[in-house]
Amino acid sequence: MPFWRGKPDGQSSDGSGYCGRALEHSVIDGYALIVLNWSVPAQISLDPYSNIRAYMERLEARLAIRRVREAEGQISW
């Protein structure tokens, strides 16, 4: 199954993320968050993809992401 389709609910509920790399983040994670946020202006609901929503929430909780959000201000689509 492609990673963007996700796993059945519950298989990644421990926060281990993809490839079981819980504490490792790379520049691609930040970029993935940008691309996934394009779903807002594209009017694509990510609600059916609970694992992707959880991934986005974990990224948004990171200090580096919060600092960038504060520096950039509110995004208006």
Image (cartoon, grey):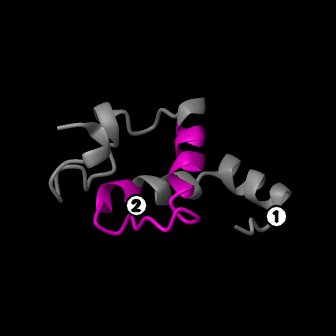
* Magenta-span inclusion, residue 37: yes
Instruction: Please name the residue that numbered disc 2 is placed on.
Output: 53
For residue 58, above or below residue 44:
above
> In the rendered image, which quarter is residue 76 located in?
bottom right
For residue 72, above or below residue 27:
below
Q: Residue furthest front?
A: 42
Q: Is the Cβ of the residue at disc 2 closer than 8 Å to that at disc 1?
A: no
Asked whether, in this view, residue 3 is left or right of residue 38, the answer is left
Element at label 1: loop
Q: Residue at x 77, y 68 (%)?
A: 74
- Residue 4: which numbered mark, if any? none
Q: Residue at x 19, y 48 (%)?
A: 7
For residue 53, above or below residue 36:
below
> In the rendered image, which quarter is residue 52 located in?
bottom left
Q: Residue at x 24, y 50 (%)?
A: 12
How crowded pointer 2 is (Cα within 10 Å; few <14, some 14-19, many 20+) is rated as some
Q: Position of residue 57 (x, y in %)?
A: 48, 60
Q: Residue at x 56, y 57 (%)?
A: 37
Asked whether, in this view, residue 57 is left or right of residue 75, the answer is left
Instruction: Please name the residue that numbered disc 1 is placed on.
Output: 73
Please state which amino acid type lies under the numbered disc 2: Arg
Q: Nearer the viewer, residue 10 or 42?
A: 42
